[in-house]
Amino acid sequence: MSSQLFDAIENLGKEKGIEKEVLIEALEAALISAYKKNFKSATNVRVELDEDAGTMRVFSRKTVVEDVEDHQQEISLDEAKHINPNYGIDDVIEVEVTPKDFGRIAAQAAKQVVTQRVREAERGVIFSEYVDREEDVMTGIIQRIDPRFVYVNLGKIEAKLPEAEQMPTEDYQVHDRIKVYVTKVENTSKGPQIYISRSHPGLLKRLFEMEVPEIYDGVVEIKSVAREAGDRSKIAVYAENPEVDPVGSCVGQKGQRVQAIVNELKGEKIDIVEWSEDPVTYVSNALSPSKVIKVLVDEEEKSTTVIVPDYQLSLAIGKRGQNARLAAKLTGWKIDIKSETEAREEGLLSEQPEEDYVNFEEDLFE
């Protein structure tokens, strides 16, 4: 075996990003397999590769016996003592069994095994590189499209964007650059698999973290996200420092920050509301842009009855109930919306009209 083989292994390792030692181990395993296959050996053997000398030697483990019955696994006491006078019966020794033409045969037989080990090592490198990208945003290029998947090139790996994770309002084109949210990275028998999404609420959250420095720095915190991808989303933000406006930070000067995210999501409408630990305030904020007269809270059922002006009822509910549905998802509270007239008829409001729209908490069932 010439030193050229070792040079080739070293170059291959650098090209694929695999340690040379991993490839040497793969080569040794391949040569052992080739020896056993071509020379019908059932005994334990090992291969010794000398990188400096560029040589390959095969050693077989044999047991010292008086009478040899199996030449592959046994060696006579006389032969053993020729090797080392200290050997005795039942000792196990290593004997060189390198065939003359083993280099040619081994090279042919080892090629497939080495290729497989290289593939496995490459998969390990790719998995290690991408496993830390779970719940992160990556930019990829659309390679191809079929009825079930959009195939996105993320660098060293191709990810499949399934129909269920696509934005229904988005038109995907080959060679387009898109941002995707990595939901999961798995190391499967077929190699690393990356699961991506364009509709996941996490994408919206990460885009705000990327676009708003106050969120990235922790000055403003994203408390909750509710999303109906491609149509409308709500995001609740909070700042512990009372001098910081969390909503204004996310909107940006002249709406530039939020507009950049809207553009990335192809026109998806985004409501940014201020989070509050008070359910009355939080639910009222979540129903933005609708005005709220009163919020009645049932703590045990974690439900609320929200009273809005008559002319605001359709706005509060939203098209096909979307505004109320997103507000409920955002806050985690059940929301039942009633008009001012309906609330008065049911005795939920006094007969005297409210001078101002003031939110206050009252237990509905007390």
Image (cartoon, helix red, strand yellow):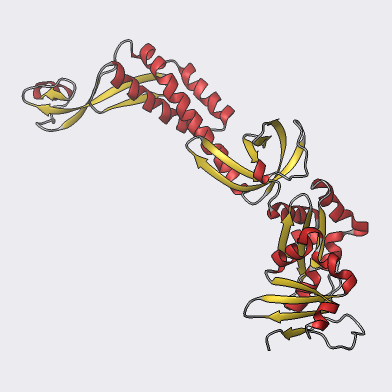
Residue 196 pos. (x, y %): 64, 44
Q: Is residue 85 left or right of residue 299?
A: left
Instruction: List the single residue furthest toward the left.
Output: 66
Q: Nearer the viewer, residue 315 or 46?
A: 315
Work out which quarter of the rendered image holds the N terminus and state it: top left
Identity of the residue drawn at 68% across and 75% down: 303
Q: Nearer the viewer, residue 153 or 360?
A: 360
Q: Is residue 68 left or right of residue 298?
A: left
Q: Is residue 98 visible?
A: yes
Identity of the residue drawn at 27% across and 24% down: 59
Q: Is residue 187 left or right of residue 180?
A: left
Q: Which of the 4 image quarters holds residue 283?
A: bottom right
Q: Which of the 4 image quarters holds residue 138?
A: top right
Measured along the vertical axis of the image, is residue 169 above or below residue 253? Answer: above
Measured along the vertical axis of the image, is residue 277 above or below residue 34? Answer: below
Measured along the vertical axis of the image, is residue 331 above or below residue 91? Answer: below
Residue 240 pos. (x, y %): 76, 73
Identity of the residue drawn at 70% across and 49% down: 199
Residue 46 pos. (x, y %): 30, 27
- Count of numbered badges drawn on the protein: 0
Q: Nearer the viewer, residue 15 or 251?
A: 251
Residue 152 pos. (x, y %): 68, 36
Identity of the residue drawn at 67% across and 80% down: 298
